Image (spheres, rainbow, N blue to C red):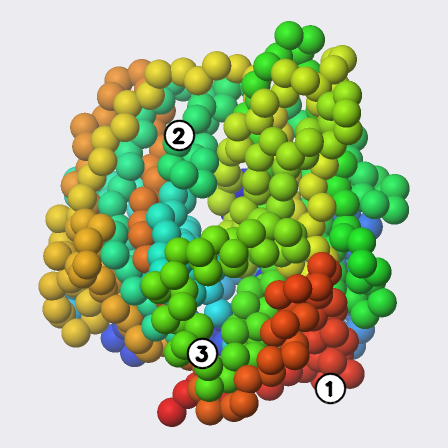
């Protein structure tokens, strides 16, 4: 199960039927969670790293400070303070008469934890796949591309996508307070040998995974054993919290140990990770520091390649939205790749090619040094097998209609100077693609190749906080301290109030 929703908050997504669908987000304190029909608790992750699935029905129910459920027919209860995440399934019926679609929309496996306001989430479009019965949340492309100059390609596996009447169907939606500019929405239909998986690099290179090896050891900076959190693709998600007092000028650290064939020279490092919701919120908070200079910052990103390079280098240096992947060699830790963040809601698998020819012995040790408060980690693996032959069919959309019934096909069929623009929450586009013939004897994986960017809706009247911006730019560790300070303020104040949208 590659899909997890890495939101460090307690909230409810409620689907409402009004001839289409809408998503409302409201804050619920952990101790006040109830179990009405729309709040279906299907399981939990405990602070000890236990994954517990509840019998269905009735699911979990909260009474006071205790959650009660049945597990394999036996009563089960746990104190809320011992729960790391609640897993909640949300679904709702949607009728979209303008585009001829009737079906359900589901956000399956929704992670719910401590109370952070969901309305602060700001990160890219949501993409839903038709799975044969309903639309399922399946991709969250081009996270972090918050200016036209930062527009980028994204390659997301669509694990839930299934054919209907000879077509694949997607929904592209805006569910956060931003304007989204989507340039391209094409499918890569990949037919590959059975028994293999196909995973994309950040640059869209497709690699086969045939013999993945889990880590045999995993520890953090303090020596805590992380293996139960990071060894498997499951619902155990390790997330270094932005707790006050935690940032000491030294980042968190993950050291992974894998078996390695003696003659291995290259490895495919598979990572299932995401930007945390708090990390996503920090994008909004840091950009808001520019105040009335936000338009100037946008123009700089749009027109100055050097400014963009400096921004990317800063993010890598701080370990906030990119982390060097370091391999232990004779001379010490050497960066051999980069792990980049994704959107905060879904964590697609991605693969990083590593040179391991200088890693001695029969073990491969890999180090990651993330800034606390910005990341959520599900699992890692390595594969030393050569890539197997695959067949890739690129499929352009055959139809694309927005909720007003306007044809958006030209805007989404090619990467050019024409964008599908969604400026408001509730905007959406329904897209269909013809299904290529199935190749006998091969398995199929479908990727969404998209391209775009988005602009956050922020007030542009305040005076810029130049001193804070300079600290972020010039002081190592300042971004980590910024996240920790904001988290401490949130806890003291009972939660941030999101900045109102610009008028």
How far across and how far down the image is residue 194, in percent? 40, 19
Q: Give the alpha-carbon distance from disc 1 to disc 3, as whole Å.
A: 27 Å
Q: Give the alpha-carbon distance from disc 2 to disc 3, as whole Å.
A: 37 Å
Give the residue pinned by disc 3.
294
Q: Earlier in the sequence, mark 2 or mark 3?
A: 2
Give the residue pinned by disc 1.
493
Q: Are marks 2 and 3 in contact (CB under 8 Å)?
A: no
Instruction: Identify the residue at image location x=36%, y=57%.
Output: 151
Q: Residues within 10 Å of mark 3 (few under 14, many from 20)?
A: some
Instruction: Answer with left or right where residue 214 lies relative to residue 425.
Output: right
How far across and how far down the image is residue 290, in percent? 52, 79
Please tell me whether residue 409 is drawn above or below residue 347 in the rendered image: below
Residue toward you, 79 or 268: 268
Q: Give the alpha-carbon distance from disc 1 to disc 2, as whole Å.
A: 46 Å
Instruction: Identify the residue at image location x=65%, y=79%.
Output: 467
Q: Residue furthest top?
A: 263
Instruction: Identify the residue at image location x=36%, y=71%.
Output: 299
Q: Element under label 1? A: helix
How far across and how far down the image is residue 486, in percent? 70, 75
Q: Earlier in the sequence, mark 1 or mark 3?
A: 3
Give the residue pinned by disc 2.
206
């Amino acid at each position: 199960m590659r899909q997890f929703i890495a939101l460090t908050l307690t909230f409810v997504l409620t689907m409402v039927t009004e001839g289409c669908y809408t998503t409302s987000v409201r804050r619920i304190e952990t101790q006040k969670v109830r179990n009405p029909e729309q709040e279906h608790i299907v399981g939990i992750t405990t602070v000890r790293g236990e994954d517990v699935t509840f019998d269905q029905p009735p699911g979990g129910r909260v009474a006071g400070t205790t959650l009660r459920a049945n597990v394999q027919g036996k009563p089960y209860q746990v104190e809320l303070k011992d729960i790391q995440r609640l897993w909640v399934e949300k679904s709702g019926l949607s009728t979209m008469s303008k585009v001829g679609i009737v079906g359900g929309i589901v956000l399956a496996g929704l992670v719910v934890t401590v109370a952070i306001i969901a309305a602060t989430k700001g990160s890219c479009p949501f993409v839903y796949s038709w799975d044969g019965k309903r639309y399922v949340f399946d991709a969250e492309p081009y996270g972090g591309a918050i200016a036209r100059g930062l527009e980028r390609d994204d390659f997301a596996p669509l694990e839930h996508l299934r054919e209907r009447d000879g077509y694949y169907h997607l929904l592209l939606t805006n569910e956060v307070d931003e304007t989204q500019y989507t340039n391209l929405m094409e499918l890569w239909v990949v037919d590959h040998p059975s028994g293999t998986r196909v995973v994309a690099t950040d640059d869209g290179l497709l690699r086969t995974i045939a013999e993945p090896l889990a880590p045999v050891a995993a520890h953090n900076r303090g020596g805590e054993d992380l293996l139960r959190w990071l060894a498997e693709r499951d619902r155990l998600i390790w997330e270094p919290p932005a707790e006050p007092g935690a940032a000491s000028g030294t980042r968190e650290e993950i050291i992974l140990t894998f078996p390695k064939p003696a003659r291995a020279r290259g490895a495919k490092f598979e990572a299932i990770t995401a930007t945390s919701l708090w990390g996503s919120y920090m994008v909004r908070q840091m950009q808001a520091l520019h105040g009335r200079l936000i338009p100037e910052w946008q123009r700089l990103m749009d027109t100055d390649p050097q400014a963009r390079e400096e921004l990317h280098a800063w993010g890598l240096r701080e370990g906030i939205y990119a982390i060097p992947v370091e391999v232990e060699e004779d001379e010490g830790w050497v960066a051999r790749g980069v792990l980049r963040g994704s959107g905060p809601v879904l964590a697609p698998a991605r693969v990083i090619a590593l040179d391991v020819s200088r890693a001695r012995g029969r073990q491969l040790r890999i180090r990651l040094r993330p800034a606390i408060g910005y990341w959520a980690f599900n699992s890692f693996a390595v594969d030393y097998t050569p890539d197997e032959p695959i067949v890739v069919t690129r499929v352009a959309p055959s139809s694309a209609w927005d909720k007003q019934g306007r044809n958006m096909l030209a805007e989404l069929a090619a990467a050019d100077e024409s964008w599908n623009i969604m400026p408001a929450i509730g905007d959406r586009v329904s897209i269909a693609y013809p299904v290529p013939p199935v190749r006998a004897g091969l398995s199929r994986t479908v990727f969404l190749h998209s391209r775009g960017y988005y602009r956050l809706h922020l007030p542009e009247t305040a005076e810029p906080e130049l001193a804070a911006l300079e600290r972020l730019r010039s002081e190592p560790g300042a971004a980590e301290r910024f996240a920790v300070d904001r988290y401490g303020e949130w806890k003291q104040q009972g939660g941030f109030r999101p900045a109102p949208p610009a008028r």
